[in-house]
Image: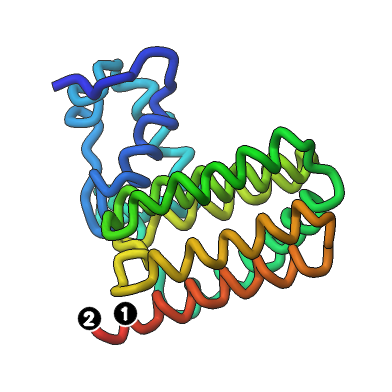
Amino acid sequence: MTHPRTQNKDAYTLILEAIDLGVYKPGDRLVESDLADRFGVSRTPIREALQRLETQSLLTRDGRSLIVASLDHNQLAELYAVRSELEGLAARLAARHATQEEVRVLQEMVSDDRALIGDANGLARANRRFHKMIHLASHNRFLVQQLDMVHRSMALMATTSLAAEGRGEVALQEHQAIVTAIKARNEDAAYDALKRHISKAFETRLKLSADR
């Protein structure tokens, strides 16, 4: 069956979104013909997209098959270390450059997302939107590009840290602290608040991994 909303999206984006949404999880095998049928595109762009995803280490080889990659403990730690610094920089630059409209949108996101507490998947989608808005509010295209790469790799995590009991409410409190600092144009506070937020998310993910 053709995937909905495939118009105006290339094969790479469609496959990446499916991984991000958990349609394909770490360890799942991706087959050209199945993907072509699912997304309603020919096999040539699917093949090119799979090659691109393999080059970016989002897919890996298992014999002749391509499977969705997974992250080991060290890779996870490396990813969070890079994410923490880049996200902190984005918050610092947002405190410096964000427009009043962007700040209002960030505040509205935090307020609206409270209705999603208890819905881990909904909160995860809202969390991605919130962080993306901070990236854009930094008004630094090169930083946004690097953060896009980091967040593509985040899709390789089978579960969201927001699934942990109580994490959703605490995460929104952390989001509020970030927005408050950005609104106050306090660059150091924005940087610190976002880095603390990422650190807590990493701690939560480590605990989830240990429990499994």
SS at mark 1 in the image? helix
In-front residue for pair 184/195? 184
Q: Residue at x 51, y 43 (%)?
A: 129
* Residue 111 vertical position relative to residue 177 in the rendered view, above or below: above
Question: Where does the N terminus fall, quadrant-wise?
Answer: top left
* Residue 43 vertical position relative to residue 172 in the rendered view, above or below: above
SS at mark 2 in the image? loop
Which residue appears farthest toward the top when viewing the image?
7
Q: Residue at x 80, y 56 (%)?
A: 184
Q: Residue at x 32, y 79 (%)?
A: 209
Q: Position of residue 186 (x, y in %)?
A: 83, 62
- 75 vs 193, left or right, is left
Q: Which residue is mark 2?
A: 212
Q: Are marks 2 and 1 in contact (CB under 8 Å)?
A: yes
In-front residue for pair 168/199? 168
- 80 vs 17, left or right, is right
- 80 vs 6, left or right, is right
- The colour mode here is rainbow
Q: Amino acid at mark 1?
A: Ser
Q: Position of residue 143 (x, y in %)?
A: 74, 48
Q: Position of residue 93 (x, y in %)?
A: 81, 52
* Residue 211 vertical position relative to residue 187 in the rendered view, above or below: below
Question: Where does the C terminus fall, quadrant-wise?
Answer: bottom left
CA–CA distance between discs 2 and 1? 5 Å
Q: Amino acid at mark 2?
A: Arg
> Can you tell which quarter of the image residue 89 is in?
bottom right
Q: Which residue is mark 1?
A: 209
Q: Position of residue 134 (x, y in %)?
A: 66, 47
In-front residue for pair 1/206? 206
Q: Residues within 10 Å of mark 2 (few under 14, many from 20)?
A: few
Q: Residues within 10 Å of mark 1 (few under 14, many from 20)?
A: few
